[in-house]
Image (cartoon, rainbow, N blue to C red):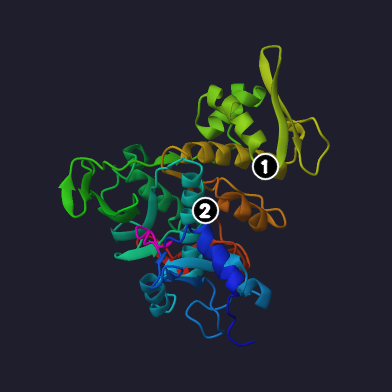
Amino acid sequence: MGRINFAARIKRIVAERAGFLCSYPNCDRRTIGPGAENDETSNSGTAAHIFSAAVDGPRGQGILSEEELKHSDNAIWLCRDHGTLIDNNRGDMFPPQLLLSYKQMHEARIAHEQQGLYSPIGWIHKVRLDESPIFTNKSSFMLAKLNLVIGDNATGKSALCEWISGVFDISYLSRWRKVRSPLKINLTYFTPQEIKVGLAIPDNNRVLYKVNERRAPVNPFKINLISPRNEKSRLTKEEENDDLVYFAGILKADPVVVESLVEEIHNYHHSKIRNIRFESEDSVRHMYLDVEGTHPGLSFSSLSGGEQEQVFIEFVSAWARFCGRYTPTVLVLDGFVSRFFKGWFDYYSHHFLDPDNQFQTILTIPSRDIDLSHIRWNGWQVLRTSGSPPECTIAQEL
């Protein structure tokens, strides 16, 4: 199989979906305009390959067929400068999953602007750990729209989630302020302009910030963090008896929020659950619902563990989806998902990558025998943690 080129029709589709603007974050260069003659136009954009056009291309071809390689899903619209920049990096700085995220973020914004809606952009792009009690110094990695962190227990997966979250919400740093070991983390963040935010905990009493290398009393850039509780088996007596209270406890939200999310789930075209309702029985609320592939009208308690987990994911993603329309949002699923049905990544990749879902996702799971090439094609940035503190490492698997 030689070089796979895009047909003219595909190039037009990709350009139009991008609004003829460069999809590289913070560029937005217009790529179409008047030509030399009155009846001509000039197009300075390019439909760049996400997975490479040639076998020896900068980002490889993964496991894609020829049809998939020349499909519009494998193309991102860029100005010529950024198209050249990305290819000249041989894929090291711009792996396929990062380009997929650029495309998804840009097309989502264009779609909302077309509807007269201007959604706020907040995007964590790069993380650098200058010092930490767990990882080797100067560890760095990039984040995409979908991020999968794989590693054995005690290799720093939860710590990464807490540190990234802590840059925006100091409450996530409570246990690290008690550790007598310095922590220094820097994030590159798109708002959509590029911002560098640094956080340092030099001792157990202070938290120091920098914004674009200047000292700051706080981080003025906020992200809405949705981080559900992962200890679903540890229930209070009230949670055991009342499904609404149980869901509120898992989501770390008020029961009113849980009930309000039901309509959001019902209206989402990718949802696998329908007809959710809470019915009071002796002042206790029980959930009943239809789950795709099961009998309609089952109670939540009668579902299998995997089916219950699907319901939880629908609720937390609905919450992130709603918040993402109005404020930058990150969904952190740290140890939250434990059951992976066949095709889990196929389904949830389309679910989370949908233009309606304008939030980033960070998912952590223990080490598993997973086809990473297939996951990357579905848009996941894969990070693998390994080793023992304080010499753990983070590998960004390309």
Q: Is residue 219 left or right of residue 16?
A: left
Q: Is residue 33 left or right of residue 354?
A: left
Q: Which residues are magenta?
A: 22-30
Distance between the alpha carbons at the discs numbered 1 and 2? 22 Å
Q: Quadrant location of residue 378?
A: bottom right
Name the kind of residue labelled 2 in the image. Answer: Thr
Q: Residue at x 60, y 21 (%)?
A: 238
Viewer-side residue, 158 vs 169 = 169
**Image quadrant occupied by the N terminus:** bottom right
Q: Is residue 23 magenta?
A: yes
Q: Residue furthest left?
A: 215
Viewer-side residue, 222 vs 299 = 222
Q: Residue at x 67, y 74 (%)?
A: 67
Please tell me how crowded label 1 is: few (under 14), some (14-19), or many (20+) other residues with Cα within 10 Å: many
Judge whether 119 appears above or below 346 on screen.
Answer: above
Please tell me how crowded label 2 is: few (under 14), some (14-19), or many (20+) other residues with Cα within 10 Å: many
Judge whether 197 appears above or below 225 on screen.
Answer: below
Name the kind of residue labelled 1 in the image. Answer: Ser
SS of the residue under disc 2: strand
Disc 1 marks which residue? 271
Viewer-side residue, 123 vs 13 = 13
Decide if residue 222 is in sight here. yes
SS of the residue under disc 1: loop
Of the two numbered discs 1 and 2 in the rendering, the one whose residue sits closer to the viewer: 1
Q: Position of residue 218 (x, y in %)?
A: 23, 40
Q: Residue furthest right?
A: 295
Cβ atoms at labels 1 and 2 below 8 Å apart: no
Q: Position of residue 375 (x, y in %)?
A: 60, 64
- Number of residue marks: 2
Disc 2 marks which residue? 364
